[in-house]
């Protein structure tokens, strides 16, 4: 008995869909995005897990867990298992990955997926192994790694396979990756563990030191998004901030300006500028000439900070190019690699026993 698939495209598509389940993951400090071959981005969740402190039982992941940050009873702990772009809690990361993979697939597959995961260019071999092991324990049959700057460049559409130089800055929650890319490789790069999280920490410290006002990480992130800036604004703005008075011990409301928040962000921003200058100093002259012509592309959630392109432009005297969807560049680039692994063989790091 033969199956006439030519007359049954719906059945054939469902049948092949049981096997075509390869996944690309942007495993970020702040958010994890999942791309499935043939479907595009199917999941965008905070990299947060809520667990029982005693039993280590997982209560929630993603958005549900993030809503618990700073609000849990003693029994429950909301954890961000990645720090500075790498795994800080192996077991929790493994569980989070398994949950996200199940959420993304939404149906059972006969074959475990191949997974491509982005990693910071500056991580160690031990940290790479931790990522691979977490993905394999979460259900992957094969794991590939790709450096975040290359994935971001491919996601933006830069010609990474050409001999001309392309410079990209990817600013995530835990790291800032600055790389010059040519011929499918990173010619020189600077990876610093400074990103959106350090900006949030700077805001928390500033309000605590200057106003005895204690705020949570989510409030700091909101302040950064609402009135944060890296460069002077044409019209400064204000917002009300609610927290706890460290002296009186009671709730307190404070009005703060964008100018003051900009001052609080000077240290992490200065570190980014210094890393950018250092990377430019390492760039070979021929590729530096290409960057003068093409400019520098900035991606990642951190690039959404107001005035950041102006700050980098003033520091380098080079054109700074922003993109429409900076949050999705890395996962889209990883997805392009996933869709045609053969064409991008040179940019991926195969899993192994190293």
Image (cartoon, helix red, strand yellow):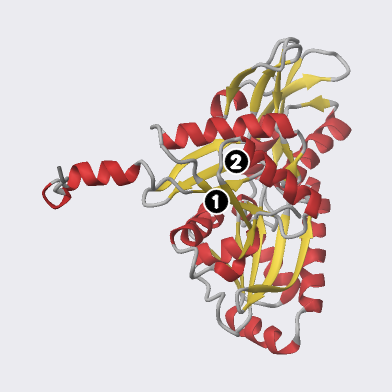
Q: Earlier in the sequence, mark 2 or mark 1?
A: 2
* Nearer to the camera, 166 or 346: 346
- Of all residues, the one furthest to the front in this rendering is 1
Relative to 41, say whether 218 is above or below.
above
Q: Which mark is residue 327?
A: 1
Q: Residue at x 81, y 19 (%)?
A: 245
- The quadrant in which the N terminus is found is top left
* Nearer to the camera, 251 or 217: 217
* Nearer to the camera, 241 or 308: 308
Relative to 113, say whether 191 is above or below.
below
Horizontal relation, residue 262 to residue 6: left or right: right
Residue beneath label 2, please? Answer: 31
Relative to 76, say whether 279 is above or below.
below
- The quadrant in which the C terminus is found is bottom right
User: At which x and y percent is residue 221?
Assistant: 66, 37
Q: Is residue 261 visible?
A: no
Local crowd at mark 2 within 10 Å, few (<14), some, or many (≥20)?
Answer: many
Q: Is residue 4 visible?
A: yes
Horizontal relation, residue 5 to residue 208: left or right: left
User: At which x and y percent is residue 260?
Assistant: 76, 44
Q: Which mark is residue 191?
A: none
- Of all residues, the one furthest to the left in this rendering is 7
* Nearer to the camera, 280 or 284: 284
Instruction: Kindly indicate whether the residue at mark 1 contacts the one at mark 2 (C-beta within 8 angstroms).
Output: yes
Q: Secondary structure at mark 1?
A: helix
């Amino acid at each position: 008995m033969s199956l006439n698939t030519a007359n049954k495209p719906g059945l054939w598509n469902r049948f092949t869909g049981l096997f075509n389940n390869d996944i690309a993951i942007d495993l970020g400090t702040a958010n994890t995005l999942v791309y499935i071959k043939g479907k595009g981005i199917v999941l965008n969740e905070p990299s947060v897990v809520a667990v029982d402190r005693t039993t280590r039982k997982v209560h929630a992941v993603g958005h549900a867990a993030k809503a618990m940050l700073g609000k849990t009873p003693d029994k429950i702990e909301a954890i961000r298992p990645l720090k500075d772009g790498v795994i800080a809690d192996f077991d929790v990361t493994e569980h989070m990955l398994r949950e996200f993979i199940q959420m993304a697939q939404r149906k059972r597959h006969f074959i475990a997926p191949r997974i491509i995961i982005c990693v910071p260019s500056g991580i160690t071999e031990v940290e790479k192994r931790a990522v691979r092991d977490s993905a394999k324990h979460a259900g992957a049959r094969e794991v590939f790694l790709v450096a975040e700057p290359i994935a971001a460049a491919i996601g933006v559409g830069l010609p990474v396979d050409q001999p001309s130089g392309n410079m990209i800055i990817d600013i995530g929650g835990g790291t800032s990756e600055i790389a010059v890319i040519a011929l499918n490789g990173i010619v020189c790069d600077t990876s610093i563990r400074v990103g959106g999280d350090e900006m949030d920490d700077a805001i928390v410290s500033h309000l605590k030191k200057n106003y005895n006002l204690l705020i949570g990480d989510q409030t700091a992130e909101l302040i950064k998004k609402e009135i944060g800036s890296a460069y002077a604004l044409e019209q400064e703005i204000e917002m009300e901030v609610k927290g706890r008075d460290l002296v009186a011990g009671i709730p307190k409301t404070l009005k703060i300006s964008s100018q003051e928040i900009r001052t609080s962000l000077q240290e992490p921003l200065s570190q980014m500028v210094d890393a950018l200058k250092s990377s430019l100093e390492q760039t070979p002259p021929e590729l530096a000439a290409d960057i003068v012509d093409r400019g520098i592309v900035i991606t990642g959630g951190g690039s959404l900070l107001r005035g950041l392109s102006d700050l980098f432009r003033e520091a380098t005297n080079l054109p700074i190019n922003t993109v429409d969807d900076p949050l999705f560049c890395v996962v889209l680039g990883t997805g392009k690699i996933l869709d045609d692994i053969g064409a991008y063989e040179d940019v991926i790091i195969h899993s192994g026993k190293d």
